[in-house]
Amino acid sequence: MSNEVTFIHLSDPHLIAPSKQASLYGVNTNEKLSLFKEVFSSLPFKPAFFIMSGDLIHDGDEADYQYVKEFIRNCEKQFQAPFLLTLGNHDRRKAFRSVFLNESKSEAPYYYSKTVGGVRVIVLDTKIPNEVNGEVSIDQLNWLADILKVDTEKGTIIAMHHPPIDDHLRNKAAFGNMIEGTDVIGILAGHTHNSCLFQFHSIPCTTVFSTAYGMEELKNTESSQNEYGTVKDRVGSSVEQTTSETNTIIASDNKEKFDIKMTQTTGFHKVEVKQRQMIVYPQIVTTENSTIF
């Protein structure tokens, strides 16, 4: 078994069934995700799997999930790699369970664990019905505590829609206490429609641009996949411009206030697990027909 595991993290496609002939804020989200699929076809590496961290559809129904399911089925066949799905605040659990799991319609949270190539991926469901922000339910915290009692070969990555920043995740303190000191080596999230890197309880954490709105060529910059820009985050701390060869996450965390690096890139993230560490490589994707939200 190889020591390295490489995969793709993308998020927030907000897909709408083509039969509805709908655009979202002037953007055809289906076309945007198809453009990403073209990019994946020319990758110089083979992903072991894909993580799509929530908001698969946009406040839709079973027809939208049927479209998502067909898209993912084709991708898994083409790339010979599974898609691990997370639900977000725009997702609908009943419709998702009916279409993807062939289950009766239920509001039960969708969470699970899957090991691929020695890396354990734990998917959490942070959706609170009819609300924008999220939380990790008590049942999930108890399940998480139990499953993390046993370490894995290459470490554990947690995929969730709401990142543990600001008020996005309401019970981030309880969640942080639960994973601190375990074999969790990284957290992957979406929701913000921005790409940022930070640490949470000394664990690397990243959000990724929405595929629906993240294919915009950067203007007036000399962009590379390793370059960061100066930003001001939601909790008021600033990060000065810097460059990193590997985009490893070096920001600090005092459990209440975060120093966050916003990446000057758009697109998706290539993620490597190597020597029980998560390394994130934000990828630039450009297109002539791009529109950013």
Image (cartoon, rainbow, N blue to C red):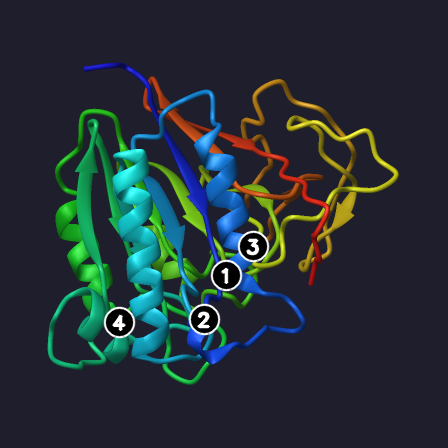
Residue kind at label 4, given as amino acid type: Phe
Which of the image's four quarters has the C terminus? bottom right
Report the Cα–Cα distance between label 2 and label 4. Answer: 18 Å
- Against 34, residue 58 (above or below) is below
Helix, strand or loop at disc 1? helix
Q: Which residue is mark 4?
A: 96
Residue kind at label 2, given as amino acid type: Pro
Asked whether residue 184 is in view, the answer is no
Q: Nearer the viewer, mark 3 or mark 2?
A: 2
The spot of residue 285 in percent (x, y) is 62, 39
Q: Which residue is mark 1?
A: 30
Q: Confirm or deny contact between disc 1 and disc 2 (CB under 8 A).
A: yes
Q: Is residue 40 left or right of residue 214?
A: left
Q: Amino acid at mark 3?
A: Lys
Q: Residue at x 13, y 51 (%)?
A: 146
Question: In the shown orientation, is residue 59 left or right of residue 193?
Answer: left
In this view of the protein, which residue sits in the foreground, 46 or 140?
A: 46
Mark 3 lies on residue: 32
User: In the image, residue 288 lies at what x, y percent?
Assistant: 73, 46
Mark 2 highlights which residue? 18
* Mark-to-mark CA distance, 3 and 2: 13 Å
Q: Quadrant of the N terminus?
A: top left
Horizontal placement of 167 versus 171: left or right? right
CA gap, disc 3 and disc 4 = 22 Å
